[in-house]
Amino acid sequence: MSIFQLHVNGRLHTVDIDGNMPLLWALRDILGLKGTKFGCGVAQCGACTVHLDGRAVRSCSVDVGVACLSKITTIEGLSPDGSHPCQKAWVELGVPQCGFCQPGQIMSAAALLTATNGANPTDEQIDNAMRGNICRCGTYPRIREAIHKAAGGAKS
Amino acid sequence: MSKVTRRKFLRDAGIGAGALVWGCYIGPKGLFAREHLPEIIHTGVPLGKNNYFVAIVPIEGTIVITTHRAEMGQGIRSSLAAVLADELEADWSRVRLRQANADSDKYAIEFPYEVKEELPFPYNMVHRSKPPQYLIPVEGSQFTDSSRSMTAYFKPMRLFGAGVRAAFEQAAARVFNVDPSQCHASQHKVHAGGQSIDYGDPRLLFHAGKLPPAKYEDIEAALKDPKDWVFITAAKKPMPFADVSDMVTGKPIYGADQDLPGMLTAMIERCPVANGRITSFDPAPALAVPGVRKVMRVLPANVPPGGVGQRFLPHDGIAVIAENTWAALQGRRALRPTIVCDYPDDLARENAKYDSQVFRQTLKDSTAAKGMLVRKTKADLSDADFADSANVVEAEYYVPHLAQAPMEPPVAIALYRNETMEAWAPTQNPELAQQDIGRVLYGLTWDHDLDEEEIQQIRKTVTLHMPLLGGGFGRKSKPDYILEAAFLAKQNPGVPIRVQWTREDDIKFSYYNAASSQYLKAAVDGKKTTALLQRSAFTSFFGTLFPESRAKERAALFNGGIYPYGSAIERAQGLEDMPFDVPKLLIENCPAKNYIRVGWMRSVANIYHAFASGSFADELAEKKGADPKDHLLDLIGNGRIIPLPEEAVPEFNNNGLPVKIINLPVAGGKILPMVPGYPPDTRHLLAVVKKVAEVSDWNNKVKQYKGTRRGLGIAAHRSFLSYVATVIDVSLSEANELTINDVYTVVDCGLAVNPDRVKAQMEGAVVYGLSLALLGEITVKNGAVEQNNFDDYPVLRIHQTPRNISVTIMEVDKETPPTGIGEVGVPTVAPALANAIVAAGGPRIREIPFYKKVVVL
């Protein structure tokens, strides 16, 4: 066990845990941030996606000892009130079905829009940014539409 | 104000037994304390049992609607509540949803319905237009399965809403001292002349509580005219989607998200073989992992390990119980090498030899011989019909085991204390889970039939909370993972135990969709198909669920066939009701045994039956040189209610609707024996085929694509009382790399109560169907599933999803009741895709997954 400082959603948390613990479990079990989901544990499904310094990463596959070097943003910290353009577009288009994967989807999509500086991504850019996020309900068509909408653009 | 107890309030309000009671709760913080609105007492609309579905907070006027089904992505929580709110004329911004616990006493509505012996001619023209007169489906539980929620509860929710609204109108008449006919409710108020009174007004509630119980007929008469609907069919306002804002901010509680003080997390290492036992293990390495508290067996000695014939019992397993998930995972890794499994009986030994590739041949061999009769035309089919081999088409289709892989792996929490059990369990089957937890609580084994007293005792002492499900797809109809939590909780009194499955657990310990082999053979005469033989072999789920000692239960479910033949439910999913109108038809079911746990996955037996019939129709068109769409219409014929009773199907399991045969007078003074309700009617199937041809621009595109590496495929199927036709447009590169350009799908699901969610379900079903068709395969070697996670059990991702999935909902009369939607979009996808690949110059694919025959990037 070691002491780590985790900078999550603008707050500093001091935790005494195994440095090899994946960030996912530290967020969920230690910090009680349940919005980040466990779907596969091997960076295959993207349900656990969070931002490290603004980049989308799979928190199941990043150790706390590494994550503590970056600013961590989870779905709870993406916006104070659900007003991120992706969140708004997701609501307007009724993207979620069961909703379980959507925090991860939204974190990936938000990172994509940061990478394009808010410009409307092409469908290929969406494919590349979002192919690591599985949705078993099959909301992909609406995810694509919502990303375009969040970027303020029509479908490219 | 002084503290008021609920009992006192009720007494003061003059509300007694038999009266219409507007249940309300007076909490310790007073009358307005909305945060203290627990189990709501609500008798009211006298529909068989009491109304626990709607309550109102006095003065504040918040309407609390109880949602009793499992929410796993269908949007049913909002849809059913909105139906009720619509009839109630509630202001949605003043509606709050409350998720029910498992409770059959409250939520299994015994609903009055009537099946008339003889229906007026022409019954076949009106059978779906006015069924409430003679048929309302009964769904006696919260079991959220078979795409039945809206079919079963649309009418009850309407009645609850209308009943309360009518009572408010009558109560307002007393408040205003006017005739009830002058009172009209709208938007959370009752208006009379220039006056109005809010639903929360205590005067209104007082008088409502004094009303005599309403009669069913009066409530039915109070139902809104469809032209006055607001949310239903999104007539005036979009259907609300109550959970969506929470879902995009990470707030909702799914199975793994419930936090309880002192909770420990368990990970379980299981015997990979069905019915196998763990004979020894060493807890020491796991206990050496920091944070690991205990290592223990899950099952008590008197409970057999799960597997074939053991219902929903979990595989034998050893739990590592730890302070957090990471510690449990590490402890489990340390435990794994110490586990020794053994196969103590013939069943387990046989299972330990199971090889799904070898079994594929066994299934195929099964269809080579005559099977159990499923359906036949009056005209007998014989070998002579296939004598002219130049005009015979035959084909075999194979679908492997498939795993549902819901996005949240199974997880459940149980807490045993003070001789009671409390569980937080994302389940599609709350009452069964509750009963099975009760068996754990009282040490009752599964070979014991619970009597009514035991069931009542269990209902009193087992509380089951229903969080949101992170997907279900049939996996979470089986409570094995909940039982694991219960078994462990029983051994750890006072400590909440959360059993967390990994994705590997989910893939390796599913209740898999049946592996199936289908053999079809047809005789062709010019453009006509004169004879058709279909033999279906599949591993029936009831073979998994009941051991041979439960012969009676099996027989009841098999309806004529006994395991290793298929059950009535599976036969009714695209086999008995195979839609093609051929002069000589013979359908048989061939036996197949289970060696792993078999359950069901979204659309179940329809997957392999539709794949076979939909592909074979296309093969016949190819043989005849006909356009596949025109040929499909020809093959379905003129349109008819499939005369099942006349064709050796005495009882058709019509998705749980009454199957009693009625004698229907038809033209010419004849009597046609018929299954009432929503019989398989190929006129609806023809209509969706025609519609999908229109929206996909079939005729033009077929011409346009001719001779190119682009093509269209079509398939149509009825399931869960709904009709679907799908066209898929694909391109193939010279290297056979597949691109799916467009999917057009058309559904007739009766009244589309929530059109946006209907659309969402159909979009999702296309993705689910493409997943299983292109990529789906579970293989078993030495009794153990070979796949592990999404790397070797891949599912469709966004870059593989067609850019255009077009959904068309057939317009129906507003009186048409809703039929299934959750599963119905899946079955047509695989055959339409296979047919499209052929049209694009690719190979004929007769087995799932397709990636073995074309390149899926």
Image: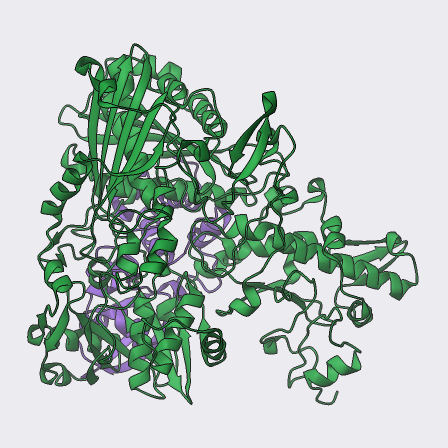
Give the chain coloured green.
B
The residue that appears at 80% across and 78% down in the rendered structure is B14
Image mark count: 0
Say which of B486 and B137 sits in front. B137
Residue at 21% x, 73% y is B268
Residue at position x 55%, y 43% in the image: B818
- Who's the residue at 30% across and 50% down the image? B562
Name the quadrant containing residue B714.
top left
Quadrant containing the C terminus of chain B is: top left
Direction from residue B451 to residue B777 in the image, left or right:
left
Camera-nearest residue between B708 and B112: B112
The answer to which quarter of the image holds residue B183 is bottom right
Q: Along the horizontal axis of the image, is B209 left or right of A82?
A: right
Q: Is residue B119 visible?
A: yes
Find chain A in the image and tell me its colour.
Answer: purple
Residue B807, image x, y percentages: 45, 34
Position of the N terminus of chain B by quadrant: bottom right
Most extreme residue toward the top is: B526
Q: Is residue B769 left or right of residue B181?
A: left
Q: Position of residue B155 (x, y in %)?
A: 62, 50
User: In this rendering, is residue B720 above or below B7?
Assistant: above
Pick whichever, B524 or A91, lies toward us.
B524
What percent of the width, then of the height, locates residue B834? 25, 30
In this picture the colour scheme is by chain
> x and y percent of residue A64 in the render?
21, 72
In the displayed structure, B744 sits above or below B305; it is: above
Q: Does any portion of residue B405 appear in the rendered image?
A: no
Is B855 situated above or below B386? below
